[in-house]
Amino acid sequence: MEEPWRDLSGERQVVVDKELELEVKDVEKSYDEARLIVEKHGGFVASDEISIDAHALDTAVLTIRLPKDGFEPAIAELRKLGTVIKLVGESQDVTEEYFSQGAEIRSRADREQMLVEKYEKETNPRKKRQLEAEIEQLRREMRREKEILTKLAEETHWPTLQLTLKERGGPAGFLSEMLERSGRALWPGLGPRPSSGCRWWCY
């Protein structure tokens, strides 16, 4: 990502945050698969928490950052890991703020250059010290503004996804598991084969 204060593209800048909650059969396996999908699309897991408990339903929560071009394709793949329980999101258009801050930083950089040139030509020690103090103050302000704009650019270029994986449980999950086991017992070696028009398994 280029330095955001040098960005003159005028492209729309949007901060996007989404939450995806999936019900999965095996949380540990789905967790590993989710990480591979994220890496495939150029992203990374910023933080994660996984809970495996023999006396409770397993869960995993991942905070994921993805490049904006890979954000939606990654979500489409992640949805295939299980049953979607929730998919919500929000977006905030920060285009005006993004480019106005960049313009302000460039303006300060021009003033800094002018003051430096003036400082180099100045011969009066008192005025030279005044110019030096003014330059240092300007540079502190620029550093602070650059940090703010860099953080904003990270948010617009790297959308955030919070992925929650929950072990399938409850009556529906129990029935699904029992049907699968019954199918294996009655037709060894066949296993379940989903087919259009069949509610559970077709053989």
Image (cartoon, grey):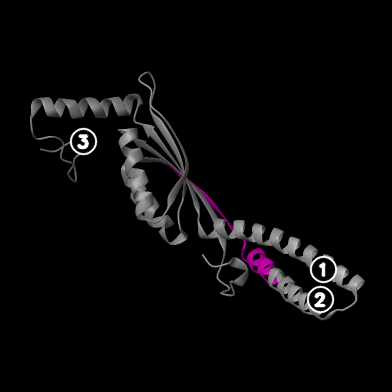
Q: Residue at x 8, y 30 (%)?
A: 187
Percent across and percent down for residue 177 are 24, 27
Q: Residue at x 65, y 67 (%)?
A: 96
The residue that mark 1 highlights is: 132
Looking at the image, do the residues carrying marks 3 and 2 touch, with CB atoms under 8 Å apart? Answer: no
- Please tell me whether residue 96 is drawn above or below residue 115 in the rendered image: above
- Please tell me whether residue 13 is drawn above or below residue 127 in the rendered image: above
Nearest to N terminus: mark 1 or mark 2: 2
The residue that mark 3 highlights is: 200
Looking at the image, do the residues carrying marks 1 and 2 touch, with CB atoms under 8 Å apart? Answer: yes
Nearest to N terminus: mark 3 or mark 2: 2
Q: Residues within 10 Å of mark 3 (few under 14, many from 20)?
A: few
Amino acid under disc 2: Tyr
The residue that mark 2 highlights is: 119
- Please tell me whether residue 15 is drawn above or below residue 4 in the rendered image: above
The C terminus is located in which quarter?
top left
